Amino acid sequence: MKFLASIALLAATVSAGPLASRAPKQFTLKTSGAKNDAHNDLYLYSYHTGAGLSDAVFSDGTANSAHVYLNGTEALVDLGNTFSWGIVAGGDNSYSSWDSVEINAGASSKGFSIKDGNFIWTRADGFGGWLVCDWVHNAPQLFYLHKSFEGDLPSSCDKVDLKPEY
Ligand SMILES: *[C@@H]1O[C@H](CO)[C@@H](O)[C@H](O)[C@H]1NC(C)=O
């Protein structure tokens, strides 16, 4: 009995060990900390806008949520295709107050990480945090703020944290 138990334990250790460490840990991204409670507890999903292109949009519930994983500092998204998609922070126009975030095929911005339980981005001229606005897809959509932004946000927008949920 004792012998069988150790065999079972050994088998479990062997199968959980190398596989678990090699497979990237996937997570969904959930909004938190918005002033408008309608913008809290929403999950990121990929809203298709064209071949290989989508916008980063939110819905309640995890049914369609994007499964994100980090490869170095790239944030890749498993949409069930043979190729990978990634989170792309667009624009990069320092005269803008905020810019778009997309989920595109075969691309990802670099500089993503998880710090103190938050999914963040770092960029040379500063990351001012995540923004969620009710936008053109008639759904809350993800943007990022430039560090230099001071002023009022449109009333449909909220600053949010993005919490990885495993
Ligand atoms: C992860 O990054 C490495 C090094 O940049 C790259 O070779 C590899 O293809 C990436 N993996 C995926 C799934 O994109």
Image (cartoon, helix red, strand yellow):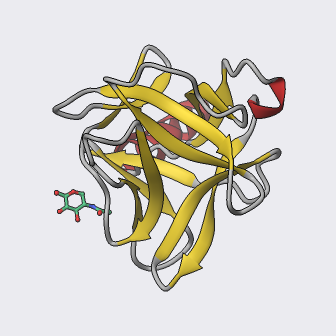
Q: Image quadrant of residue 158?
A: top right
Front-most of residues 62 and 32: 32
Residue at the bottom extreme, as displayed? 51
Decide if residue 2 is in sight here.
no
The number of callouts visible is: 0
Name the residue furthest top. 116
Question: The N terminus appears in which quarter of the rendering?
Answer: top right
Question: Which residue is pictured at 57% across the width and 39% down the height?
Answer: 8
- Tell me: 165 left or right of 81: right
Please determine whether, in this image, residue 117 is positioned above or below residue 29.
above
Residue 104 visible in this rendered orientation of the protein:
yes
> In this view of the protein, which residue sits in the foreground, 2 or 93?
93
Quadrant of the image occupied by residue 29: top right
Query: For the point 31% across and 58% down, which residue is it?
Result: 108
User: Where in the figure is residue 75, as x and y percent of width and height?
Assistant: 37, 49
* Residue 114 percent location from the top left of the image: 40, 27
- Please determine whether, in this image, residue 23 is positioned above or below residue 146: below
Give x and y (percent) for residue 52: 45, 79
100 left or right of 124? Answer: right
Identified at 39% across, 25% down, the residue is: 149
Ligand 1 found in image quarter: bottom left
Q: Quadrant of the C terminus?
A: top right
35 or 40: nearer the eye?
35
Q: Say which of 1 and 138 sits in front.
A: 138
Residue 113 in the image: x percent, y percent?
A: 34, 32
Q: Residue at x 33, y 28 (%)?
A: 127
> Picture quarter containing residue 56?
bottom right
Looking at the image, residue 78 sits to the left or right of residue 62; the answer is left
